[in-house]
Image (cartoon, rainbow, N blue to C red):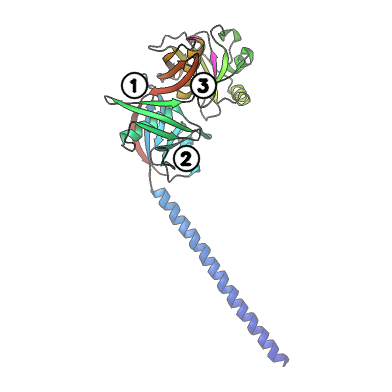
Amino acid sequence: MAQTSLVGLMGVLLCLMVVFGLMASTDFEVLIGTARRKSIESETVKANPIEVVHTRVFAASPNGGNPCPVIPFADGLTDRQMQDLARNFGLDTAFVLRSRTKSVDIRLRYFVSDHEMGVSGHATIAAITVARLDNTLKSDHFRVETVTGIFEVESARRGDEIIVTLEQNKPVFGPTLDRDVVARALNIDPKRIGLAEGPIQSVSVSRAKLLVPLEDSKVLENLKPDYQALWELSEKLQVTGFYPFTRRTDKENAQAEARQFPLRAGFPEDAATGVAAAALGAYLATYDRKCLTGQHVLRIAQGYAMQAPSLIEAIVECAEGKVTRTAIRGTAEVVRREHIEG
């Protein structure tokens, strides 16, 4: 009797071992199968090359303008891939995606080396130019979705060029600042900041910039900021960079000249910054032109300290003593196209 029970118990144990062995084997096979599938999927992703269109925006000379890589078909990319691509380029990079609603025509995302950012003026003009050249966008007027909001854009052909006008928001003027703390961040004598014609002030038409009026173009050209101090002050003021400028410029067709030092972008300076130029246009229309009713077109030179001469058109409209419209206008040139591994 005891022997029969022992045999029966051993049989049960043997059955359990077989069952668990099969389960373990099955789990192992499933695990291996999943790993193989992911490996195949990964190899497939890597096998699909990513198209990159390299452009230069707002160029005032053959070697001028702000370089901007555009990824015209970015829907299959992850956030990490977009960030890695921007880091590899070391530049503002525009990613073109399909719109998610019928109310917009195209969706754009923008990455710099260190993070994703809101709307970028020059990168938008680059992306729209590529989309028009490739006939992805077929009309001349469209709506663009960004993380900052939706913006109206128009394009017009002039010979071989596509002129793009990017609408911005009405300006928001922030508080004025004492020049001593700003001078420390810019590493200059406070007396070199010229407050006679306008204050140091944060102005935003989409992303806030700190506008700093300087005596002349020599002071502007020789700036060597304390970047850590500049970034810390930018964060405190909730601006996305400093935009020191001067009205006293010798650059052709320009009413002002500026430099842009962005907040922790992965690079110290921009050659041409559309949203900052539009903010400066609103500033100059307000303080210099007393917001006279009508349209004001102000051309801002930038990039000369980087040997990348640029010229940005800021459009400002005023009525009843207030700014009622701001926009950026300019062109992008396609430099080359390439395909890279993802």
Is 68 drawn above or below residue 19 in the view shown?
Answer: above
Query: How far apart are labels 1 and 3 at the CA level?
Result: 33 Å
Q: Amino acid at mark 1?
A: Pro
Q: Is label 1 in a helix, a strand or a loop?
A: loop
Where is residue 334, by image quadrant? top left
Q: Residue furthest right?
A: 2
- In this rendered view, identify the residue nearer to me: 65 or 4: 65
Q: Amino acid at mark 3?
A: Pro
Q: Residue furthest bottom?
A: 1
Q: Find the magenta span and give its range.
A: 209-218
The residue singled out by tag 1 in the image is 62
The residue singled out by tag 3 in the image is 171
Disc with the residue nearer the chain's start (1 vs 3): 1
Q: Residue 154's spot in the image, x, y percent?
A: 37, 28
Q: Is residue 211 magenta?
A: yes
Disc with the residue nearer the chain's start (1 vs 2): 1
The residue singled out by tag 2 in the image is 82
Query: How far apart are labels 3 and 2 at the CA level?
Result: 30 Å
The answer, for residue 221, to whether it is visible in the render is no
Q: Amino acid at mark 2?
A: Met
